[in-house]
Image: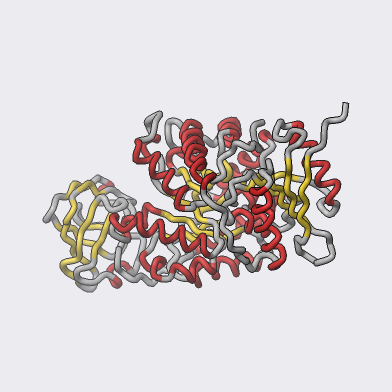
Amino acid sequence: MTRNSLNEARTKIVATVGPACEDEATLAELIEHGVDIFRINAAHGTQADYERMRSKIVRAGEMTGFHVGILLDLAGPKIRLGKLFNDSPLEVDVGDQVTFVRGDTPGNEHELTSNYTRLIDELSLGDRVMLADGMISMHVVEKLKDSVRCEIVVKGTIRSKQGINLPGTSLSVSSMRPEDVDNALWAARNNIDFISLSFVRSAQDVLSLKNLLASMDASALVIAKIEKREALEQLEAIVDAADGVMVARGDLGVEIDVADTPVAQKKIIRICREKLKPVIVATQMLESMHHNRRPTRAEASDVANAILDGADACMLSGETAIGDYPVLAVETMNRIMIRTEVLLKSQPVDSKTRFSSRVHPVTSAVTHNAANIAEAIDAKLVVVVSHTGGTAWVKAKQRNYIPTLGVSDSDAVLRRMTLFWGIMPHRVENLENPEKLIEKVTQWGIARGMLVPGDRVVYVTGTGVLVNTHNLLVVHEVPPIKT
């Protein structure tokens, strides 16, 4: 077992589970190579499939001894084409025309249908329609009662079930379909750690999911996926409402000009950092590793720049779900992270104490200054006690490079810590006794080769005088080993 390790990447890795990696041995190998959270994509499969994946992930975590997190990614209102005429692909060139019609059955090869019944009503003359993540583009040239005619402006091959993007068009579709609600309830019943909501357009979308989970007494963190223009327009309110954010660059890069996507990514990360919210950068990070053993230099730079911008995690999608080299993709991303994070050593620690509604102001102040003290005395490790995850959350957003152990006696809290930058989750019982805590961590660190006599460790915990507050900061020097 190599986790936890002082040499781990501070930035977290989210890996999508799929046919290429869903056996327990491969999942365990992915954890050992750096995966912190596994993503189950609810756009594919059934709840029986999700349960099978969940069970395998849990067993892989037990095999490695690592508290790996699980994220269920709700599909959301993804608009797709219906089946084409005779289910045959259609080649279209610039200037060709196709017609969207009501119903499920096209009358000829140039007629298209959609799973969104109000599509024809909500399109207007001049609106853009894009298929297959922007590979095919068209605009509306005629609108009738039961049909909309479009002219192709970017050629390609239209296939059944391709995704439809409507940049600039305001849709009345709900952010959560009935199947999304059902899947969210399944996640609540099965103690899933994170639930991401697709195609968020407003803070109310996020709050609706949070209210649903609250009715089930679920503790899952809600991750808002930013992939709509409307979401960018209400970004701060959405970040305030969510527990975390995902920069979903696939659909976002179609909804807005692709040239604006890098700027949007930096803006999202900056606002999340300001508001102390974890942020995941996703989509095509190591895309070429679907079939190649090495990423392109541009992809390596993409991962590195996301880290330097302040991302808490980077996500692999098809690279691990259906790619030829899932373990190598994770190992490569982990290696890029470790090399990049060396640059963070020279960055000064934020001198301003940032307060979060998740913890007592005293806890925020003590946690912040623990990092400053650790820097000043060249501490080997910072240990943060976290009963709910809030203290570890605040510590993670400070971006102090000294390795941090987040200790808790709750498995659910430890799994949530897997999203927090620089926090290594570790289970310890009897957290109320600081002396026992120091003794256990010291023994563990020495046994793992992480600590040697003379090393200094900074602890953040509580005396119990202030309820639910960490008001105790202890500097401990590892004593000589008794012979």
Q: Residue furthest right?
A: 483
Is residue 82 or residue 255 the one in the foreground?
255
Direction left: furthest residue: 95
Splitting the image into 4 quarters, where does residue 152 fall?
Answer: bottom left
Q: Is residue 394 above or below residue 477?
A: below
Which quadrant is the N terminus positioned in? top right
Query: Is residue 69 visible in the rendered structure shown here?
Result: yes
Q: Residue at x 49, y 71 (%)?
A: 237
- Residue 474: give x, y in percent of width and height: 78, 52
Residue shown at the point (58%, 43%) measured from the top left? 36
> What colour scheme does the image use?
secondary structure
Q: Quarter of the image holding residue 234? A: bottom left
Residue 153 located left or right of residue 315: left
Number of numbered discs visible in the structure rendering: 0
Residue in view at x 46 percent, y 66 percent: 175
Q: Nearer the viewer, residue 394 or 412?
A: 394
Which quadrant is home to the C terminus?
Answer: top right
Residue lying at the far front of the rendered structure = 376
* Residue 190 appearing in the image: no
Q: Position of residue 408 (x, y in %)?
A: 74, 50
Q: At 29% from the left edge and 67% from the top edge, which residue is drawn?
A: 168
Q: Residue 425, relative to residue 117: is it above or below?
A: above
Left or right side of 264 for 178:
right
Q: Position of residue 314 (x, y in %)?
A: 48, 47
Residue 365 x/y as whole percent: 68, 63
